[in-house]
Amino acid sequence: MAAYSGNFTNGRRPQATSSRNIAFLSIFAVLAGGYLAFRAQSPSKNEPLVSKKEVEAIILSLYFSIPHIHTFEGINPDSKDSITFHHTPDVSINACISHPAIVQHKPLLVFLHYWGGSSSTWYKLTSPDSPTSLCSAYPILAIDHRGWGKSTGPSQDNNTAYSISSMANDVALVLQQLASDQERKAILKHGFILIGYSMGAKVAMAILTTLPRDLLNCLRGLVLVAPAHPTPLLLPPEMQEQQKAAYETAESVRWDIEMVVRDSLQGSQLAKSVWPTYGTAEDVSDGLKRALEPMDKERLRGSILVGESDVVEPKDRVDKEVRRFFERSGIQVSMRTVPGVKHLLPLECPEVLRREISKF
C-alpha cells in the first residue's frame, strides 16, 4: 500500500407530491440504494410493530427487482491494489486501483459510490474475477468517500466536513496527486471518465467545479447512474431523522449481499448523518454551470442511466433536473432507462453499465 501526503484544499424546495403515500416514499428519495429499516416499536412493549420479514418484503419491493439480483460465485470485491492519500491528519482517502495487463489506450475510469457504499459497490465492474469487469480494458480508480469504506474523515462536523464539495475536493486532490506522481501519472495519459452513482453522481458533478484547468481538460466524459441532482432537495426534519438512523444496526440494513451490509454499517456516524441532513440540500449547480461554460461542448460526452422503476431517483425527475440541466448548459447528455430495474443498477444490471461505459 502506498501513502501520499498533501495539503487539503480547502434552495429550492421540492414541489409538493400528489398524495400522502407518494410523499412518504420521498423518505427514500436520497437513500442512495440502502435499505431503510422500519424499526417501529410499540409504546407499551419493546416489540416491533411489524415483523422483520414484513420489513424486508416492503424494502425489497421498493429497491430491488429480485430476478435481476445475483451474486457472482468466487468473486472477491476487494481484489485490487489499495492506495491511501493523506490529505490532512484526520482525512485519508482510500482508493482501489488497477491497470490492464495489456496496455490499452483507454481513459481512467473513476468510480464514485453512493451513500452507504464504498469502492466495493462497483465490484461487478471492477473485480478481475467478475464476468462484467472492465479492468482488462481500462485503468480503474474506485474511491471510498471520506467516512466510508477504508477512508477516514473529521471527527467533528461544521456543516462542511462531509459536504458534497468536500468529497469532490477529495477526489480532485487524488487526481492531482496521481498527475504529479512520476510513477503513476501515466494512468491519466488518455484522460479520465467520472462515473458516479446516486450521491456519487452529485459528487462527480461537483468535481468539475474544483478541478484545476489542466485536469478539467483531461475529462473525457461523465456517466451518471441513478443520479442525485445538482440542485437542492430539502427533506422535512422528520425524514432527515429517519434517514440518519438508517444504518445503525445490522437489522436496519438487510441486504442480500453481505458486502453491502458491511459497507453500510462501516460508515462513520457523521458520514451516515450528513447526506440526509445537508448533503441533499447542497446546491452545486451554479459552480457546475460556470465550470461547463468554457469546456469544449463537442468533446465532452455524457451518459445517464436510470432504472425504469426507481423510486429513489425517479426517471422523470432525473430527466428534468439532470439531463435538462446539462442540455441548458450546452452539453448533450444521453439518457437511458433500464427496463425492469429499480435503484441499484451496479448490482442489478452491471452488464448494461458495462456496455454504456465501453462506449468511451
Image (spheres, rainbow, N blue to C red):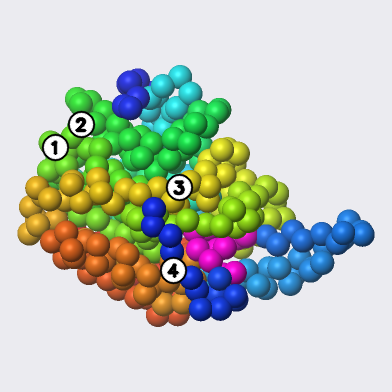
Q: Measured from the top left, where is residue 88 in percent x and y?
A: 41, 21
Q: Which residues are magenta?
A: 24-36
Q: CA distance from mark 3 to mark 2?
A: 29 Å
Residue type at the position of mark 4: Gln
Is residue 146 depicted above or below 296 in this figure? above
Local secondary structure at mark 2: helix
Residue at image mark 1: 213
Q: Name the residue rendered at 57%, 63% in the picture.
A: 27
Q: Nearer the viewer, mark 3 or mark 2?
A: 3
**C-alpha separation, residue under disc 2 versus residue under disc 1:** 13 Å
The residue sitting at 41% across, 29% down in the picture is: 84
Judging by the rendered image, the residue that carries numbered circle 4 is 15
Q: CA distance from mark 4 to mark 1?
A: 36 Å
Mark 2 or mark 1, which has the lower sequence index? Answer: 2
**Res. 243 image quadrant:** bottom right
Main SS of the magenta part reads loop
Q: In the image, is residue 237 part of the stretch drawn in magenta?
A: no
Which of 335 and 67 lies nearest the eye of the viewer? 335
Q: Position of residue 337 (x, y in %)?
A: 34, 75
Q: Secondary structure at mark 3?
A: helix
N-terminal-most mark, 1 or 3: 1
Residue 138 lies left or right of residue 352; in this view the side is left
